[in-house]
Amino acid sequence: MKHASTREVFDYWNTRRGHRIAPERGDIEPGSIRRALADSFILAFDPLAGHPFRLAGTRVCALFCRELKGEPFARFWDIDSKPSFQDLISIVADEAIGLVAGITAHTANGLSCDLEMLLLPLAQGGQLHARTLGVLAPITAPYWLGAHQVERLSLNTLRHLEDAFDTAAVPRLVAFPSTEASRRKFAVYQGGRA
């Protein structure tokens, strides 16, 4: 993960989920990720509606030069990337894994910038096919941010975060009992080969 917002949201999400597959939507406190809030968003899991934005941070809205609440995120992907985006959202919900993607944003007048996107599952009432927490952050903020509207997004690279999820299930180390305590519980039984 290259962007500080991506790392902050992932670390917070991972902490809030604990040993669960995903945290509940109500477990996410916006004030706890205030530095990354402008680059964050929440999508509704609704394939027929194009996965509309439920919430979008100010820098995410600035990329598209408008408020995004209610707009389908699928609308902004180019023809080659739209099916992949739809698949990615389904994978996040179906398999309860996160992903980080490298994206290029393009404006109508030929400007572009590289973005990093994070998608993480959120449960709602125990169901994973409800919400997706995400980050959409420019690797380097372009001079035209907020002045020129992003028209389309292209998917470049992709990394599933399966390994990161497995680390939460690793058992914690516990102190080994002292030698005296282990000797007191030691018993010798007679036996052997007959």
Image (cartoon, rainbow, N blue to C red):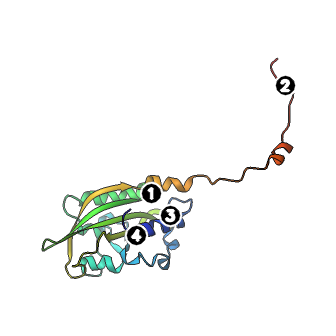
| Residue 69 visible in rendering | no
Mark 3–mark 1 Cα distance, whole angstroms, equals 12 Å
Which residue is identified by label 1? 96
Residue 4 is labelled as: 4
Mark 1–mark 4 Cα distance, whole angstroms, equals 23 Å
* x and y, in percent, of residue 112 in the image: 19, 69
Mark 1 or mark 3, which is nearer the start of the sequence?
A: 3
Mark 2 or mark 3, which is nearer the start of the sequence?
A: 3
What kind of residue is marked 3? Answer: Asn
Q: Is residue 95 left or right of residue 101?
A: right
Is label 1 in a helix, a strand or a loop?
loop
Q: Is residue 52 above or below residue 158?
A: below
**Quarter of the picture holding the C terminus:** top right
Mark 3 or mark 4, which is nearer the start of the sequence?
A: 4
In the image, 53 versus 191, the foreground residue is 191
Mark 3–mark 2 Cα distance, whole angstroms, equals 51 Å
Mark 2–mark 1 Cα distance, whole angstroms, equals 52 Å
Q: Image point 26% across, 81% down: which residue?
A: 66
Q: Which mark's residue is nearer the viewer, 2 or 4?
A: 4
Identify the residue at the far top of this view: 194
| Residue 7 visible in rendering | yes
What is the crowding at mark 2: few (fewer than 14 residues within 10 Å), some, or many (at least 20)?
few
